[in-house]
């Protein structure tokens, strides 16, 4: 089901910011589903190396714009697993420190995600080759490049969440947070994927990174950003 959905939209193949030391009262926690224009550019990225302090605490369920259930990310003791609408496992994500191993339903290793200082690298199955890197910029925007530093996508902060542009700054999709729902919308503002569970918009943006064709890699990248509380 998930593969068919992604094929239809042109693709083959989320979180509270840690406030320790930031001066906030311990009994006041920001609502991660609310993005305000006055604060969106100030949200930091936090890379957590200890999986005991990860940002994936509950099951995250994702639906098509029509409301049809598509897939879920379910937390596990060693990371997370990806299941389809029928709760059948399609991929497993094993996390150790700053590294996430991606395995298919057949237990074959498909690749790795490595997190470091606001940068997330996707590597192949034997970790001999870097495939992609998603990196946060000083202004709070993000960019997706390949192993040769070729720019493929810019992910720009907006008052509603994020906008994904190609390397020529053409709008590809938007991630909007509104009324307790985070949605991925195409260039015509049609919702193609959404969740009512709490997920950071930049993590959800990974599902709109079309240059990463492999479905498990995009879902794994999203999961790693969630676990690392990326903003």
Image (tube, grey):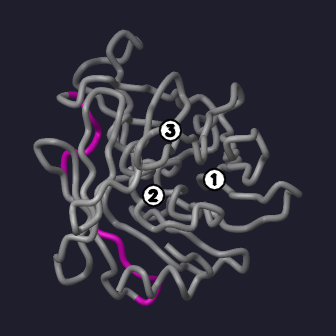
Q: Secondary structure at mark 2?
A: helix
Q: CA distance from mark 2 to mark 3?
A: 16 Å
- For the residue carrying disc 1, how many other residues have a C-alpha within 10 Å: few (<14), some (14-19), or many (20+)? many
Task: Tell me which residue sits at (45%, 57%) in the image.
Answer: 217
Q: Nearer the viewer, mark 1 or mark 2?
A: 2
Range of magenta residues:
53-66
Identify the main secondary structure in magenta: loop
Q: CA distance from mark 3 to mark 1?
A: 32 Å
Task: Tell me which residue sits at (51%, 44%) in the image.
Answer: 122
Q: Is residue 138 left or right of residue 32?
A: right
Q: Nearer the viewer, mark 2 or mark 3?
A: 3
Q: Is residue 164 visible from the viewing direction of this image?
A: yes
Residue at the spot of label 1:
162
Residue at the spot of label 2:
217
Q: Secondary structure at mark 3?
A: loop
Q: Position of residue 177 (x, y in %)?
A: 51, 59
Task: Tell me which residue sits at (38%, 31%) in the image.
Answer: 17
* Residue 128 disc label: 3
21 and 103: which one is in front?
103
- For the residue carrying disc 2, how many other residues have a C-alpha within 10 Å: few (<14), some (14-19), or many (20+)? many
65 and 152: which one is in front?
152
Task: Tell me which residue sits at (76%, 58%) in the image.
Answer: 165
């Amino acid at each position: 089901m998930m593969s068919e959905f992604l094929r239809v939209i042109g693709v083959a193949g989320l979180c509270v910011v840690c406030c320790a030391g930031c001066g906030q009262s311990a009994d006041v926690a920001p609502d991660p589903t609310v993005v305000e224009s006055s604060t969106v550019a100030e949200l930091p990225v936090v890379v957590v190396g200890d999986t005991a302090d990860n940002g994936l605490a509950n099951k995250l369920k994702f639906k098509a714009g029509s409301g049809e259930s598509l897939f879920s990310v379910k937390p596990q003791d060693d990371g997370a697993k990806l299941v389809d609408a029928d709760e059948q496992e399609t991929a497993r994500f094993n996390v150790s420190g700053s590294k996430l191993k991606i395995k298919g339903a057949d237990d074959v290793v498909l690749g790795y995600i490595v997190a470091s200082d606001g940068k997330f690298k996707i590597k192949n199955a034997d970790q001999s080759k870097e495939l992609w890197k998603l990196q946060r910029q000083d202004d709070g925007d993000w960019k997706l490049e390949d192993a040769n530093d070729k720019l493929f996508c810019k992910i720009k902060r907006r008052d509603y969440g994020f906008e994904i542009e190609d390397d020529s700054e053409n709008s590809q999709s938007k991630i909007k947070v509104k009324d307790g729902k985070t949605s991925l919308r195409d260039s015509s503002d049609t919702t193609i994927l959404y969740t009512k569970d709490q997920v950071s918009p930049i993590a959800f943006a990974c599902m709109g990174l079309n240059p990463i064709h492999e479905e498990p890699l995009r879902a794994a990248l999203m999961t790693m950003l969630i676990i690392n509380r990326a903003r």
